[in-house]
Image: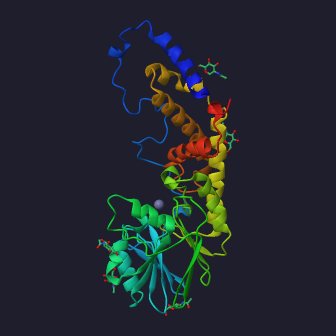
Amino acid sequence: MQLFRMLSVLSLAAVGLACGHPHAHDEHEVVTRDSIKIAPGPSDTQIQFAPLPSIADSVTIDPALGYFAGDLGGGVHWVTDGSYSNMFLVSTHGVIVVDAPPTIGHKLLYAIGNTTRLPVTHLVYSHFHSDHIGGASLFNASHPTIIAHAETFNLLASLSPRDPLRPLPHVTFEDKYTVGVGNQTLELSYHGPNHTPGNLFMYAPVQRIALLIDVVFPGWVPFTELGLANFVPGFTAAHDVLLTFDFDVFVAGHLGRLGTKQDVLLHKKYMEDLQASCVSAINGGFNVTAAIGPTVAANQGNAWAEFKAYLRIAAQTCADNTTSRWLGVLGAADVFGFENAYRMIEAVRVEYDVLGPFGLS
Ligand SMILES: *[C@@H]1O[C@H](CO)[C@@H](O)[C@H](O)[C@H]1NC(C)=O
Ligand SMILES: *[C@@H]1O[C@H](CO)[C@@H](O)[C@H](O)[C@H]1NC(C)=O
Ligand SMILES: *[C@@H]1O[C@H](CO)[C@@H](O)[C@H](O)[C@H]1NC(C)=O
Ligand SMILES: *[C@@H]1O[C@H](CO)[C@@H](O)[C@H](O)[C@H]1NC(C)=O
Ligand SMILES: *[C@@H]1O[C@H](CO)[C@@H](O)[C@H](O)[C@H]1NC(C)=O
Ligand SMILES: [Zn+2]
């Protein structure tokens, strides 16, 4: 309610401004899509960003192969193309594959084929997103048992049309499931929605390896909009859940390197800082009237235009405050600084209930 009261006060002020110009709309240029991007920030057209710090370094990928396969010991291997990563476990009875990123695609079959002659008997989906499991049908010929969380099944089954590249799981569960094949054990657990509903934690206790996809981006800030997080409180809490596992390395699903507990702690600090900065931005971090006034004046009765201005300025204020502290600490803090702040502003508002001027009055 207060939102509309505040906006209508601004609208009235704008009417006052416009009343001397009855044909004001004739004089206006067509409103272009970025006309209310008030503060200059990492814009859609920016090309040159800050150099990456060494913490963001990738393993060396042979350009002739286009992938790197690393031996994590005890029959566990990870594969990366520099942008995506996944894992497979060679057991005495067959291979358990976790995810099949389509960018790695056939190269995953080569990585496995150069490691063992055993067939792929099990395929585990971390979550339903196509960029991590869209290569699943490459294993169709060996008819693996596909295992995933029940939410992943539901989401895939609800797609219309269904995706032939992501066959439905054969085995689903709610809380915990242990994949025991031959000499290998992989513990799967679900701790609520984070990046997506159904996104799993995986743990290989013998090799002390954890896997969590699209939450922690080791050495880097998150991918745009907090890795497209579905539920930011769960996304943030997932850092703490991950730290409860007794692991030495973890597989993150993105970029060309593995993670450690130190990486998880640093990423968690970034999330905490971003959240605190966005709370500050909403709670008096900028002059709302001054910031959105020109947009209100130029777009009479257009509540979306006014809200867009508010959200963008709040996000830019939050990003400006956060990014300087993280440049050189995590990779690409300036690249998705605005987009990550934008997602956090929305989370702080509607998921955490820090509504600033739009809160309960
Ligand atoms: C399981 O067996 C595979 C295949 O023989 C071997 O490579 C791997 O090291 C073994 N892992 C464990 C944990 O015993
Ligand atoms: C081993 O890797 C090479 C290069 O990626 C590939 O051409 C070959 O087919 C792979 N071998 C097997 C058995 O998958
Ligand atoms: C893979 O197999 C599934 C059945 O398990 C089928 O529905 C799907 O169409 C197949 N996809 C491709 C690309 O062959
Ligand atoms: C920046 O964010 C911090 C929290 O991370 C907050 O304490 C501080 O007030 C903010 N500064 C500005 C100028 O908003
Ligand atoms: C906010 O901006 C408006 C319009 O420019 C101005 O009248 C007002 O005094 C400002 N408020 C504060 C607290 O600076
Ligand atoms: Zn995803």
Query: From where the camera sits, is residue 203 visible?
Result: yes
| Residue drawn at point x = 36 percent, y = 16 percent | 25
Quadrant showing the C terminus: top right
| Residue drawn at point x = 51 percent, y = 91 percent | 182
Quadrant showing the N terminus: top right
Relative to 298, say whether 322 is above or below.
below
Relative to 37, say whether 8 is above or below.
above
Please give left or right for residue 321 compared with residue 307 in the image. right
Q: Residue furthest top?
A: 20
Give the percent coordinates (x, y) of residue 73: 55, 85
Query: From where the camera sits, is residue 64 visible?
Result: no
Give the percent coordinates (x, y) of residue 270: 62, 53
| Residue drawn at point x = 63 percent, y = 36 percent | 355
Please give left or right for residue 138 compared with residue 312 in the image. left
Give the percent coordinates (x, y) of residue 130: 40, 63
| Residue drawn at point x = 36 percent, y = 82 percent | 143
Q: Quadrant of ligand 5?
A: top right
Quarter where residue 168 is shown: bottom left
- Colour option used: rainbow
